[in-house]
Image: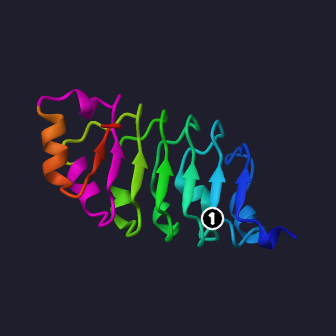
Amino acid sequence: NLHAHTFIEMRADAVEEDLSSVGRLMPGLAEARMNASIVPTMRAFGSTFQQMKVLWLSRSELRDLSGIASLVSLTEAYLSFNDVTDVSPLSELDFLTTLDLEGNRVADSDAPEYLNMCPCLTELSLEGNPLARTMGYRNKVCCAVKRLLVLDDR
């Protein structure tokens, strides 16, 4: 009975497979470890992952975060080593506490302002992004997202 499962570890190719079918088969899914998958856009998840709290999607060719707001219960997102440039879709995640975007391509100086719209965000990693190499990076991020307790694992 897949309805009772709350965790899955899998590799997926969202270009070839419909990920929303996983959400329909496992409506109670709270954690998904999908590292090394092929998921170019968060829209691939559709709107069937209503209970998803923790998502690992590192090294998964992710470029577009549009659609991530459909993961309404998301509290932790581990999206390191992808090709994300625009963090603005994250601004709609009301319960996000932990965000790992290490090794992406975030360069926009307004990115911290968008992340500040996540009212629960306390842990953030932007290390390895072009933004992290700019003058005053740590100060700018910490001033913009005042409730941060951890930035880049420090």
Looking at the image, which residue is at 21% across and 54% down? 145
* Horizontal side of residue 102 vs 56, given as left or right: left
**Residue 19, horizontal then vertical, whole percent:** 69, 57
Part of the protein shown in magenta:
111-135
Q: Which quarter of the image is occupied by the N terminus?
A: bottom right
**What residue is pinned by disc 1?**
30
**Residue 130, horizontal then vertical, whole percent:** 28, 29
The answer to whether any part of residue 86 appears in the image is: no
- Viewer-nearest residue: 110 or 29: 29
Looking at the image, which residue is at 16% across and 53% down? 144
Q: Is residue 21 magenta?
A: no
- Viewer-nearest residue: 1 or 69: 1
Q: Which quarter of the image is occupied by the C terminus?
A: top left
* Horizontal side of residue 27 vs 85, given as left or right: right
The answer to whether any part of residue 128 appears in the image is: yes
Structural crowding at the residue carrying mark 1, measured as other residues with C-alpha within 10 Å and reported as few (<14), some (14–19) or many (≥20): some
Q: Is residue 77 above or below residue 80?
A: below
Looking at the image, which residue is at 60% across and 45% down? 39
**Residue 71, horizontal then vertical, whole percent:** 52, 66
Say which quarter of the image contains residue 152.
top left
Q: Is residue 43 above or below residue 57?
A: below
Question: The disc labelled 1 sits on which kind of residue?
Answer: Ala
Q: Secondary structure at mark 1?
A: loop
Q: Is residue 61 above or below residue 150?
A: above
Report the colour scheme.
rainbow
Q: Is residue 116 magenta?
A: yes
